[in-house]
Image: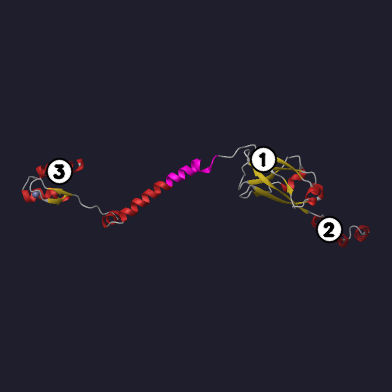
Amino acid sequence: MKYDCKIQTSIENNYFHPKSMRSLWVAVLLVFFVSPSLVEAEPYRISGIITYSDGTTVNYNDVEIVCNSQEYDCHPFRGTESTTDMYGIFTLDLDIEEYHDGAELILNVRNENFSHIIDISEMRNSSQNFVANDIQLLQSRPPAPILSGFTCGLIIFSLVFGMVLVRTATRLMTPLGRAEFVGYRAPRIVQCPECSGHIEQHRLISHLIVEHEIEPLDAGEIAGIVFSEIEMK
Ligand SMILES: [Zn+2]
């Protein structure tokens, strides 16, 4: 009975009362999930033109935010990226909070890093609605893409492909070419050395044997001479 009594009192204690426990947890959850949205985030836009060392624009190229490891205020924006347009202009849109003011972002373009210090007042006072950040790379413009190995290979490949295509097409325009295309070979016509008659190559030996009564061995020899003369032509 003594222990029962003790439990009873602890349950009745306000702090450990199940109902209070529940409301305490609700309060904790509210702090975790609602409070970030209570802090006012505001849009921050960085925009500018990116050029190579010779002043030509860097078109259709990635711009990515990277961070110095010790610059923790940069970390939420790490990996944010954008691509320059056909005029070399990029735009990075961020949602920042008051405490990000003065944080250093690193803008990475073609493996070169450029510092950008977040300046909230400059953003607020900007008439063009962005903080200007033009970038000039140290590297010069890469050679024209037409000279690159891949493009060169591609051109050669398409030339060869085109030639094969044209050759096949012209062959297919003649009836004989069409027949050859599906595997038919036109027989070669040779001249019989005995009677000067024109005859298909594969029938010459039997012709010599049958029509001119030549021994098979000799017929083969004669035919061989006729064939080799054709090859020479
Ligand atoms: Zn003959």
* Magenta stretch in the rendered image: 143-157
Q: Which residue is mark 3?
A: 226
Looking at the picture, how far across and down is residue 166, in whole percent? 36, 51
The amino acid beneath tag 3 is: Val
**Viewer-nearest residue: 3 or 203:** 203
Looking at the picture, how far across and down is residue 24, in whole percent? 86, 58
Instruction: Say what secondary structure mark 3 lies in.
Output: helix
Choose mark 2 or mark 1, whichever is in front.
Answer: 1
* Residue that appears at 68% across and 39% down: 113
Choose mark 3 or mark 2, whichever is in front.
Answer: 3
The amino acid beneath tag 2 is: Trp
- Name which quarter of the figure residue 8 lies in: bottom right
Choose mark 3 or mark 1, whichever is in front.
Answer: 1
The amino acid beneath tag 1 is: Gln
Looking at marks 3 and 1 on the same chain, the residue that comes earlier in the sequence is marked by 1
Q: Which residue is mark 2?
A: 25
Q: Which residue is mark 1?
A: 136
Assess disc 2: are there few (<14), some (14-19) or many (≥20) residues with their C-alpha within 10 Å of its C-alpha.
Answer: few
Q: Is residue 33 left or right of residue 107?
A: right
Q: CA distance from mark 3 to mark 1?
A: 78 Å
Instruction: Say what secondary structure mark 1 lies in.
Output: strand
Magenta stretch contains residue 159: no
Dot 2 beta carbon under 8 Å from ligand 1: no
Task: Kindly check if marks 3 and 1 are in contact, taking CB atoms under 8 A apart as contact.
Answer: no
